[in-house]
Amino acid sequence: MVMRPTTRRRSGDTGFTLIEVLVALVVLSLTASGIAVLFVMSIRDSRAARDQTTAMVMAVERMEQLWALTWGIDAATGVPLSDVTTELGRSPPDGSGNGLVPSPPGSLETNTPGYVDYLDGRGRWMGTGATPPAGATYIRRWHIEPLPADPDTLVLRVLVTTVVRDASPLAAGQRRTRRADEALLVTVKTRKAG
Amino acid sequence: MIKKMLQAVGERGFSLVESLVALVLMLVVTGAVFGLLNPSSMASRTQPEAIDVQQRARVGIDAIQRDLLAAGAGLGSGPAVGPLVNYHAPVVPRRMGLQSADAYNLARADAITIQRAAGSYVQTTVRDPMAPGALDLTVNEPPNCPSRNGVCGLSQDMTILVFDPISNFDSFVIRQVQAQTVSLLSRQRSPSAGYAPGAYVAEAEFDTYWHDPAMRQLRHYDGYQTDVPVVDNVVALGFEYFGDPDPPTRPKPPLGTANCLYDAAGNAISGLSQLPPQGGSLAPLSLSTLSDGPWCGAGDNRFDADLLRIRRVRVTIRIQATQAGHRGTGADYVNPGFAKSSQLAVPDYLAVFDVAPRNLNLGR
């Protein structure tokens, strides 16, 4: 008695062919890599959120320090009082800077001594000057500009960007706005009598 | 017969080569899948913890920043004008209130009490004199009062601040209002001072933030009966103060009355000196400077006159991962854990931020 080749057909019906298995594997690995991409995205986004928070905390810190600089009117004499010496770019601040003296144009775009400092990835102060020290992650710049109609009212801007982001230049004539992973704050400070 | 059987087996199953190929494929694929799964399972265990640390940091920063920004604010709709700091210190480095209050001469780095008027129209003045310790209050009804009920809109359970230009202040909760008399409960052990007619009354808010090192919590106390955790797993909280190098000039009492800054003839007597500034505006105020007198106010609400200098507060808050399995060892961890790999470790999040309370920076 000889087995008929029909049995092969039956075994084909009940099991899987190599092709089927391969197709299944390809589908499986595509799905798995799709899920892996989701993990990668989630890690990247939560790091971006952390860096954004850190950048914002650093920007707020400088804005509040600028806010607390003297910019008032002496109650007894009526003479304006202005801080023109505090160097906030140093930690702790000293008297070697410009205080609330209006900054040269472009102090948000380029590192202008007196209106810039550098921080590491955890937000710790690293130094000031025209170029970031080795190991700096963040650049914090600020810009002080009186309103054209009212020299007693200052527009204060603080920008926190990363050394990496800052390396990609702006297009010619492009105005500085907030780019991804940067923090930009704007406020107005005006002279008031006490 | 054997040949037939072999043939039958061969037709029914797989050849050795087929089996080997299948086995190798299986191994390669499962290996690859596990290779993917292992780091992603670490990531999926670590990410919620990392995000949680950040979120708790944001909540803590936001709570302190919001209340500190408004320190001393809220007057202006009634008889008292200007920031609260013109009358007494709205930012104090200690815990104040009914429960576990710190002594008036203690300044600590891990607690802060912030006062502000609630910003409502319930702002008026005392009508009949209040003796020290008195818990009955009558008030005038200036035009700003929100209702004409004889007590300027004061109502049950409202928190109020009574203060004068001499630097005394006290905080009360309204127990009940009967006709034109308001009966009060003190929000501290006992009221600190008596008040003359014309002393100010305003609806107010008190916020104490403090660190509980045992529970590792940032906590908020309302100065009365509610003390609640705000953020868990806070391993450090610190406040540093920066202020005016010049001695304070307010509160200035009316002529004939002395306080911590002026004698009855209106001469400055505080003896406070000029402090060396960092730059052109602010000088750091050490905790000892803030607890060495001269003392303003009265009783438990005495406060160091240097507190009137405060213009900027630096807050340091450090948050750690909840599970020790997500903490490593080294300088990044106040409390070391046992994370088995760096992928599982979430470093402590340290935030340092400054707040310049707007109402402490008017006129400067």
Image: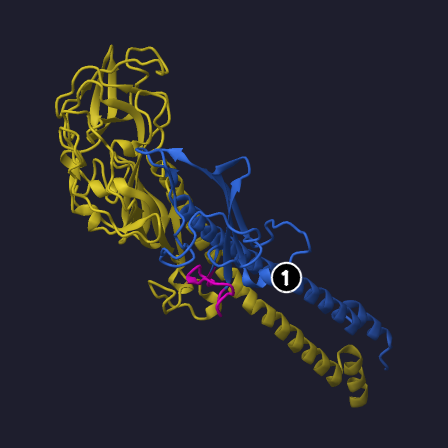
Which picture quadrant has residue A67? top left
Which chain has been coloured yellow in this picture? Answer: B
Which picture quadrant has residue B303? top left
Q: What chain letter is assigned to the residue under label 1?
A: A
Residue occupying the point 59% across, 72% down: B35
* Camera-side residue of A37 and B197: B197
Q: Does A60 appear in magenta?
A: no
The answer to whether A5 is drawn above or below residue B16 in the figure is above
Which picture quadrant has residue B171? top left
Label 1 element class = loop
**Quadrant housing the N terminus of chain B:** bottom right
Can see residue A110? yes
Residue B313 lies, in percent from the top left, at 33, 47
Residue A123 lies, in percent from the top left, at 44, 59
Residue occupying the point 23% across, 50% down: B287
Can see residue B321? no
Shade of chain A as shown in the rendered figure:
blue
The answer to whether B99 is drawn above or below residue B313 in the figure is above
Q: Main secondary structure of the magenta part?
A: loop
How many numbered discs, if any?
1
Identity, as a three-letter code, of the amino acid under mark 1? Ser
**Quadrant housing the C terminus of chain B:** top left
The answer to whether B346 is drawn above or below residue B306 in the figure is below
Residue B170 lies, in percent from the top left, at 21, 29
Residue numbers of the magenta segment: A118-136
Q: Which residue is mark 1?
A: A168
